[in-house]
Image: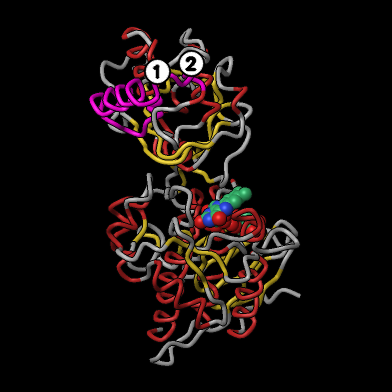
């Protein structure tokens, strides 16, 4: 049975909704808490994305302790998030989970996972914390419409036809259109949602035979054609990233590709995911340094066949053989016999290979949506709507998205915690 009246109703049982509900229902050091907190989840199983995240391991956050640096990892959000992160950032997430019995450990690249390496530990921790705080979690209950009441508070209508009245309403519906509809019906704008964090499909995939090859670091640059009728490129261009790249059966993936597509999510969408991709397989080595490497190989490995000696050891052998073949250099040629023309062609191929992008890849490591309720419409100290008092907006519902590495969950923990704290404090005042 659903209660007909509560202090706070949270719509959406994802990480942001759970963090908001738990924090609101937990008494702080001043003894303030938000009264009865009801969390409604449309599906039978809350926290589904947490469960499937990070390949079943859940990349909870990133070991980036400075709020200013943390904010740089959000293509949408950016500087505006410095304020929220100065109150609750990655270090607070680590401490919060530890206080709730879950230790997070850092991997060499900075990503943080539960020590168990299982996302179920994160789900269990959140569910237990909600239980301990007295949050009432109701599953298979979808919020459908909300109305602000004249005397304050909200009436929430559910898909089942039931209604709940609440003094405060928290929308934590992720990228689901139902949450967008409720937010806009309460006066909010919506930045059109588009996918972010995806791999790239290459036209006639010239690297298809190299699927599985990983290179690190590689420098990627998207060359974007001006939009029809636009004299200049939008402010977001040009788009460059450096890091690990994975060649797949359809094109390119890996952290650098995902970061590239996250920052270029909107400009790529405007161009129907067509662009030219410049790949510097050397990771940004200077031409003079490459010439030196080639000279050294010619001098010191003169009798070796080109296919058996790579200019530097970390260059993938399969990629090197592919580039030799593509540029008409016989792999059995001895290094001593490489012509100057051949050398320049190979250096150019290593530094500046160009591939036409034909679309988005079938999947990325994380799927997130860019777009949502504009941050300018929310008080970022409390996550309360600037347009509708008593309404709070958290998580992916907002026009915030991060690059891969735990940054998307971090925003959910931060925004959920801020909303929860504000809800607890408001209750004390009322
Ligand atoms: C495969 C995959 C892997 C990922 N891995 C990572 C990772 O390792 N690290 C990371 O930082 N990010 C990761 N992400 C991104 C991350 O999962 C999201 O950014 C995050 O889950 C957003 O949290 P949220 O609470 O805002 O929304 P969601 O997690 O989407 O939760 C919203 C909840 O609200 C419910 N809901 C929607 N509408 C209604 C309604 N009308 N009424 C009631 N309930 C409703 C939904 O069913 C859902 O349970 C991954 C995403 C995917 C898809």
The part of the chain drawn in magenta is 279-307
Front residue of 112/420: it is 112
Numbered disc 1: secondary structure: helix
Q: Quadrant of residue 211?
A: top right
Ligand 1 is within 8 Å of the C-beta of the residue at disc 1: no
Q: Pointer 2: what residue?
A: 324
Numbered disc 2: secondary structure: helix
Q: Residue at x 38, y 14 (%)?
A: 336
Viewport quadrant of the N terminus: bottom right
The mark nearer the N terminus, 1 or 2, is: 2
Q: Pointer 1: what residue?
A: 349
Q: Is residue 291 magenta?
A: yes
- Could one spot residue 394 in this view of the protein? no
Front residue of 324/335: it is 335
Residue 102 x/y as whole percent: 56, 77
Ligand 1 quadrant in view: bottom right
Q: Which mark is residue 204?
A: none
Q: Residue at x 47, y 46 (%)?
A: 372
Viewport quadrant of the C terminus: bottom left
Q: Quadrant of residue 131?
A: bottom right
Residue closest to the far front: 303
Front residue of 382/307: it is 307
Residue 260 x/y as whole percent: 42, 36
Residue 138 x/y as whole percent: 70, 70
For label 1, the crowd category at 10 Å Cα-Cα, with few meaning under 14, some 14 to 19 and many 20 or more, is some
Residue closest to the far left: 288
Q: Is residue 284 magenta?
A: yes
């Amino acid at each position: 049975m659903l209660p007909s009246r509560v202090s706070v109703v949270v719509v959406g049982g994802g990480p942001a909704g759970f963090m908001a509900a738990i924090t609101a229902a937990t008494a702080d050091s001043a003894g303030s808490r938000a009264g009865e907190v009801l969390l409604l989840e449309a599906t039978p199983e809350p926290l589904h994305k947490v469960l499937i995240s990070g390949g079943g391991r859940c990349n909870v956050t990133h070991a980036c302790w400075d709020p200013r640096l943390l904010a740089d990892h959000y293509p949408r959000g950016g500087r505006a998030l410095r304020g929220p992160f100065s109150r609750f950032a990655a270090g607070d997430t680590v401490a919060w989970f530890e206080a709730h019995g879950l230790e997070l450990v850092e991997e060499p690249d900075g990503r943080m996972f539960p020590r168990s390496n299982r996302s179920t530990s994160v789900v269990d921790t959140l569910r237990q914390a909600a239980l301990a705080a007295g949050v009432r979690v109701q599953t298979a209950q979808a919020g459908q419409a909300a109305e602000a009441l004249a005397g304050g508070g909200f009436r929430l209508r559910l898909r089942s036809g039931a209604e709940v009245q609440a003094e405060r309403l928290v929308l934590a519906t992720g990228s689901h259109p139902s949450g967008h509809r409720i937010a806009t019906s309460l006066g909010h704008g919506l930045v059109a949602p588009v996918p972010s964090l995806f791999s790239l499909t290459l036209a006639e995939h010239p690297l298809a035979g190299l699927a599985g090859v990983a290179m690190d670091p590689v420098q990627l640059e998207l060359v974007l054609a001006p939009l029809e009728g636009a004299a200049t490129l939008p402010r977001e261009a040009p788009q460059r990233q450096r890091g690990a790249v994975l060649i797949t059966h359809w094109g390119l993936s890996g952290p650098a590709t995902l970061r590239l597509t996250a920052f270029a999510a909107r400009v790529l969408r405007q161009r129907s995911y067509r662009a030219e991709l410049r790949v510097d397989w050397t990771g940004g080595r200077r031409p003079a340094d490459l010439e030196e490497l080639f000279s050294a190989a010619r001098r010191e490995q003169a009798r070796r066949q080109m296919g058996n000696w790579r200019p530097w050891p970390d260059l993938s052998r399969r990629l090197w053989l592919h580039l030799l073949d593509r540029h008409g250099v016989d792999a059995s040629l001895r290094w001593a016999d490489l012509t100057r023309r051949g050398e320049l062609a190979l250096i150019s191929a290593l530094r500046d290979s160009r591939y036409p992008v034909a679309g988005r890849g079938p999947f990325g490591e994380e799927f997130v949506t860019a777009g949502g309720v504009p941050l300018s419409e929310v008080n970022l100290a409390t996550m309360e709507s600037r347009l509708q008092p008593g309404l709070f907006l958290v998580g992916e519902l907002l026009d915030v998205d991060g690059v891969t590495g735990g940054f998307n969950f971090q925003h959910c923990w931060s925004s959920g915690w801020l909303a929860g704290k504000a809800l607890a404090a408001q209750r004390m005042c009322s």
